[in-house]
Amino acid sequence: MNALAATSRNFKQAARLLGLDSKLEKSLLIPFREIKVECTIPKDDGSLVSYVGFRVQHDNARGPMKGGIRYHPELVLKLRSLQSPLQYVIIGVFPIIAYIRTRSVESGLLQNLVDPDEVNALAQLMTWKTAVANIPYGGAKGGIGCAPGELSISELERLTRVFTQKIHDLIGTHTDVPAPDMGTNSQTMAWMLDEYSKFHGYSPAVVTGKPVDLGGSLGRDAATGRGVLFATEALLREHGKSISGQRFVIQGFGNVGSWAAQLIYENGGKVVAVSDISGAIKNSKGIDVPSLLKHTIEKRGVKGFNGADPIDANSILVEDCDVLIPAALGGVINRENANGIRAKFIIEAANHPTDPEADEILSKKGVVILPDILANSGGVTVSYFEWVQNIQGFMWEEEKVNNELKTYMTNGFKDVKEMCQTHNCDLRMGAFTLGVNRVARATVLRGWEA
Ligand SMILES: NC(=O)C1=CN([C@@H]2O[C@H](COP(=O)(O)OP(=O)(O)OC[C@H]3O[C@@H](n4cnc5c(N)ncnc54)[C@H](O)[C@@H]3O)[C@@H](O)[C@H]2O)C=CC1
Ligand SMILES: O=C(O)CCC(=O)C(=O)O
């Protein structure tokens, strides 16, 4: 199921449980604004290349819109999947356009098209996530359909600056505050801050996840992984277990996956398999995570690590373990592989890794899923601390950041559990009803008077 259909389905189910008025439901679902911009840059060899950038601002009832900027070829229009003749027949007049576009995508002509539905779903998720975390923000998400690994540093800088030039009037400290996501990092935020400041004066709070030297918060880099740790601890505690002694499998070893792995290792958990774009590895006795981190920095991937055996990357999600942590792409757990999953717990560090069809299959199997809008909310929570520090002009100690994060994650878990009891639902619906209810209340309080 496409990401937007899946997210909207969860939203509608929550709206039904809450008994929301249908007009309010509709207004919460429609994004506040969708921005699509052309970003053309000269490559290092002088040739021109054009990309499509997106920013979807979903909702601002509870405060400035907030969410990451993603650079990933996954955002390339997904028409490639429309390849069976039957699909072309079913969708009627669309086939000719689809065929031409599919051919164009394959031949590279349209390789930089972005899938607006994906960004739209991610923006909507941010609205419910900031509400679950109980931080004073709405939701947004952006991205450029590009393969950052294939661009040089100077090409990435030019692309980021052009994108910022195109959207600078529509973002701002009290309007919409971007942050890093897949394929972007603190350096990307430093370029955005610099470019934005050329138009509006020095404005450190316009982006979060910046380098600490430019007003970034101590602890932001590790925050999403640390939040995953705190949320996992809370869930396991409820089941009479702790991190120590559990076997973990992690898909994705970037910012979120590698920090989660490191913190789980430090807390006595056994990381038995890890994958990233380069490949997958397994060691049933437990991977030495600090050594794997060193290897990954040197070799730019987990592949070739000599403290574990290589395995088929496609099998990572069905490896034997107690806790599975998807920390890479969306939609990876679906009806094709859900039956094969052997974990007892799934902690959604990635955004929307589980398709609703898989949700149903896993629920029947008794697998407990900690949903993305709670599990990975540590990143945006520390982004909020960074924004507060920038506005106050006062920097916090790292210990304070981590302690506050633990409080927010623990409260989020408790609030979600209360909604589960009130509505007799699973953790995903507990989180969705919590988030949607908070946004609905703020929307009604603000009113619609023109
Ligand atoms: N960075 C943050 O603060 C937050 C990130 N997230 C979500 O966490 C997920 C990961 O984000 P980051 O770690 O920031 O991104 P990242 O770009 O730092 O790392 C992504 C990782 O996924 C791996 N990957 C990419 N394609 C893959 C594939 N087909 N199979 C296996 N691994 C693959 C990459 O090799 C890399 O290890 C995303 O879904 C993101 O939206 C959610 C909340 C906050
Ligand atoms: O830190 C932020 O503002 C954004 C984090 C994000 O993109 C996410 O939680 O998916």
Image (spheres, grey):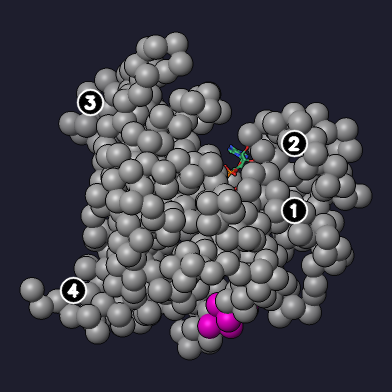
Kind of residue sitting beneath label 2: Thr
Mark 2, secondary structure of its residue: helix
- Circle 4 crowding by C-alpha within 10 Å: few under 14, some 14–19, many from 20: few
- Sequence-wise, which precedes: disc 1 or disc 4? 4
Residue placed under numbered mark 2 in the picture: 296
Do tag 2 and tag 4 residues touch (Cβ < 8 Å)? no
Tell me the magenta residue range. 410-415
Residue placed under numbered mark 3 in the picture: 97
Mark 1, secondary structure of its residue: helix
- Mark whose residue sits in front, 3 or 2: 2
Residue placed under numbered mark 4 in the picture: 23
Kind of residue sitting beneath label 4: Lys
Q: Whole-Å distance between the Cαs marked 2 and 1? A: 13 Å
Q: Whole-Å distance between the Cαs marked 1 and 4? A: 44 Å
For residue 415, above or below residue 108? below
- Circle 3 crowding by C-alpha within 10 Å: few under 14, some 14–19, many from 20: few
Do tag 3 and tag 2 residues touch (Cβ < 8 Å)? no
- Sequence-wise, which precedes: disc 2 or disc 4? 4
